[in-house]
Amino acid sequence: MSPESLQQRNLSSPTTFLLLGFSSAYGAQMTLSLFFSLIYLVTVLGNLLIVILVWFNTHLQSPMYFFLGHLSFLDICYSSITLPKILGDSFSQQKTISFVGCITQIYFFLCFGGSECVLLAAMAYDQYLSICHPFCYPMLMSRMMCHCLVAISWLSGSFSSLIQAFLTACLPFCGSNVIDHLFCEMPFLLQASCSPNAPLNKAILYALAGTIAMGSFLLTLVSYAHIIGAVLQKGGGMQKAFATCTSHLTVVSLFFGTGAVAYLVPHSSTTKEIDKVLALLYAAVTPMLNPIIYSLRKSEVKGAIRKALCRRRLQMSAKGSGIATEQPPRFPGQGCSSQ
């Protein structure tokens, strides 16, 4: 193979990309590393707590908490795709990522993001059935239906992201291999492509992503339109039921709102830092806030946390006093309230 051919091959298939990230000043890097570490720690611990509570607590076995457990697991995976790499880059002067690593990051980022879109729509549908069809709810939202909706969310996210990652990997890249972003994300990687078919590929990629995101968002809107109609029609007793939807609406607004601004607003050289802040919002901050906004506001979850803490305190107290307990007390709440 001639040197010209080798050079052309290297230009069209780069082995590494350079991520610019935020400021390169040492003091700023240390501050950012502490900030990213705190976000990731809170995200993992908060969502892991919800997963454990839903999995082991018999009082949290309703469809709503079944979906919530999967949402928390998705949030852990979603933030783990980007934050550890961003955290590692904050300690490094050369923020590089391999071509294969970049495509892999794009695949999993789109996979978990798309799955979360569909899962949020499934949770809205669950709220719709519980409020608008309460008598048919146990039959319509059976255990089999819950598993089917979760499987659809995972399969749709995986299939769509596989096509998008494959089409992105097939694009030729030439010139600069610099990506002015925090991590590998499809819109910013497409800017580095020199293919004449890049606009067509970009349209296909956005159509696939839009089908998942907009389809899920529209299904969520339809569900809440019916919920609001039922509340306005029946009034009184339905308003308390609708109050349980506010946490889900907040999560939906954060997730879809920041993602829509980041992907639909045109990118320019003057908004690079804003793009990075928005990326942090939907890739890191939203998964961190979900357990706080959605889960920890519900009395059932807070009650489960209190019982678990009380049970642990009683076991430690019994162990310290030399009393062996084979099983936890039957009414741990009473034990804690008496202390």
Image (cartoon, rainbow, N blue to C red):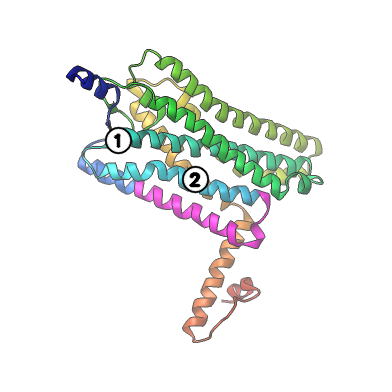
User: Which residue is farthest bottom?
Assistant: 322
- Answer whether residue 293 is magenta in the image: no
Q: Measuring from the top left, give residue 292's x and y in whole percent.
A: 52, 50
- Answer whether residue 50 is magenta in the image: yes
Does residue 318 lie above or below 20 as drawn?
below
* Residue type for callout 2: Asp
Q: Mark 2 against mark 1, which lies toward the viewer? A: 1
The C terminus - image quarter: bottom right
Of residue 329 and residue 241, the one placed in the foreground of this image is 329
Residue behind mark 1: 98
Observer able to see residue 76? yes
Q: Is residue 128 left or right of residue 55?
A: right
Q: Measuring from the top left, give residue 253's x and y in whole percent.
A: 56, 35
User: Which residue is farthest left?
Assistant: 3
Q: Quadrant of residue 251?
A: top right
Q: Measuring from the top left, give residue 45's x and y in whole percent.
A: 45, 55
Instruction: Tell me which segment is drawn in magenta.
Output: 36-63
The N terminus - image quarter: top left
Residue behind mark 2: 75
Q: Is residue 321 left or right of residue 58?
A: left
Are the residues flagged by discs 2 and 1 in contact, CB closer than 8 Å?
A: no
Instruction: Name the N-terminal-most of marks 2 and 1.
Output: 2
Q: Secondary structure at mark 2?
A: helix
Q: Quadrant of residue 103?
A: top left
Does residue 34 lie above or below 312 as drawn?
above
Examine the residues drawn in magenta and state their main secondary structure.
helix
Residue at the spot x=48%, y=18% of the render? 203
Of residue 34 and residue 220, the one placed in the foreground of this image is 220
Does residue 28 lie above or below 335 as drawn?
above
Label 2 to label 1: alpha-carbon separation: 25 Å
Residue at the spot x=25%, y=41% of the render? 28
* Residue type for callout 1: Ser
